Amino acid sequence: MEKEFKVRPNYAVGVFNAAVIIMLVFNLSSFINGKLPTASFVFYVIFTAVLTFYFMGCRPVKYTVKDKEVIMHRRLIPDKKVDLIHAEVIADPVSKMSDIVTRPHAIELYMDDKACIKFFPMDAAEFTGAVLGENKRIHCTVKAYTDMHRKIEKRERKQRRKEERRRRSHIEE
């Protein structure tokens, strides 16, 4: 069964891209007024185009979970497919010394070749459930997903105990 998930927007990237575009407008006005050399203006236009291409075209737009794989859809470059057969663990983000900033909304998928793939879905628990539905052998440590299922299992255990007590009381009578 195919499930699609939207990507959680990264506001820091949006603010940075907006600032770069505002600076381009400022530099355009400086270039028109003759205060900015042509070489600097051309460099800044190319710099803005490359950053905008990367932030708008190379980042995932949505995720699709189907046929034991996760497809990361992108606007301008080909989609990336992640095979869930080779996945070992799905987890909340783990802060590492190599990361400057750890995004708390990320879902990390660790593969058997020790690669770490990060996903940023809007609904982490539902995304985790879809991934685990495709490959049940993946070990899950996503807090939102495990807490939700722990509550459901606890409720089911209580219901089973109540039913057992009712059966016992009917047998004794």
Image (cartoon, rainbow, N blue to C red):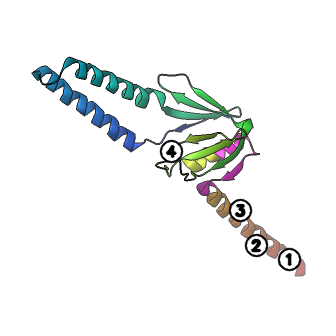
Alpha-carbon span between mark 4 and mark 2: 37 Å
Compare marks 1 and 4 and give the one earlier in the sequence. 4
Disc 2/disc 3 C-alpha distance (Å): 14 Å
- Is residue 62 shown in magenta? no
Taking 52 as reference, is 155 above or below it? below
C-alpha span from label 2 to label 1: 10 Å
Q: Which residue is mark 2?
A: 162
Distance from disc 1 to disc 4, alpha carbons, whole Å, reads 46 Å
**Number of the label disc, if any, that sits on residue 168:** 1
Assess disc 1: are there few (<14), some (14-19) or many (≥20) residues with their C-alpha within 10 Å of its C-alpha: few
Quarter occupied by the N terminus? top right
Q: Quadrant of residue 172?
A: bottom right
> Residue at horizontal 65%, vertical 63%?
151
Q: Sort mark 3 into few (<14), some (14-19) or many (20+) by Cα contacts within 10 Å.
A: few
Q: What residue does disc 4 label?
A: 122
* Disc 3 to disc 1, C-alpha distance: 22 Å
Q: Amino acid at mark 1?
A: Arg
Which residue lies under the disc numbered 3?
A: 153
